[in-house]
Amino acid sequence: MIARDDEVGEELGALLSQLLSVVVEREAPILAAHGVTMWEYVILSRLWGESGLTQKELARRSRRDPTRLIGHLDTLGDRHLIAREVDGSDRRRRTVRLTDEGRELVLAARRDIRQMEADLLGGLSVDAQNDLRNALAVVLRRNT
């Protein structure tokens, strides 16, 4: 059902913006406890389940400027959370993959973030929480 123009209610952008601020505020100490910044966590998360991504593809998927991505990759590499390797099919390209340490960090951070989200969404049933996540994922896939 599509809302009529004269119906009262906040716009999706306003709701999502406010919710994002709350989520970021609550995630910051979790990520800090795991020793990563938000951008570093985004990068690590985009590598999850991948055998390796080119730096260009990783920049696209993480929505990070490629020139800024390099600094994050240097930091993550120094901490042995990622490995960068020359692409076997094109020696000019480098691929990036999670290390075992990187996978462990993502799992631990994800577990803590899910706890925070359960608290944040505590007013909704578990089914409603899953429906919300799934609906947002569908909207994102349709528009990216």
Image: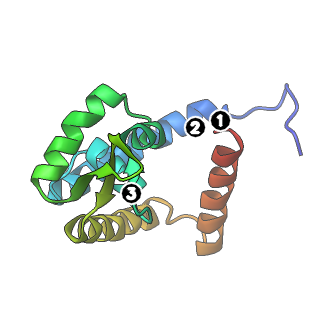
Q: Tell me where residue 93 sits by quadrant.
A: top left
Q: CA distance from mark 2 to mark 3?
A: 35 Å
Instruction: Give the class, few, some or many, for how many residues have Cα within 10 Å of label 2's Cα (few <14, many ≥20).
Output: few
Vertical comparison of 17 with 134: above or below: above
Residue located beneath label 3 in the image? 52
Is 37 left or right of 49, judged from the image as shown?
left
Q: Residue at x 42, y 53 (%)?
A: 46
Label 3: state its secondary structure: loop
Residue located beneath label 2 in the image? 15
Front-lying residue, 137 or 94: 94
Q: Earlier in the sequence, mark 2 or mark 3?
A: 2
User: Percent x, y for residue 143?
Assistant: 68, 38
Inspect the image, locate mark 3, and give the three-letter code of the amino acid beneath it.
Answer: Gly
In the picture, the disc for residue 26 is none
Q: Tell me where residue 119 sits by quadrant.
A: bottom left
Is 54 left or right of 80, judged from the image as shown?
right
Which of the two discs, 1 and 3, sits closer to the camera? 3
Q: CA distance from mark 2 to mark 1?
A: 5 Å
The scheme the figure's colours follow is rainbow
Residue located beneath label 1 in the image? 12
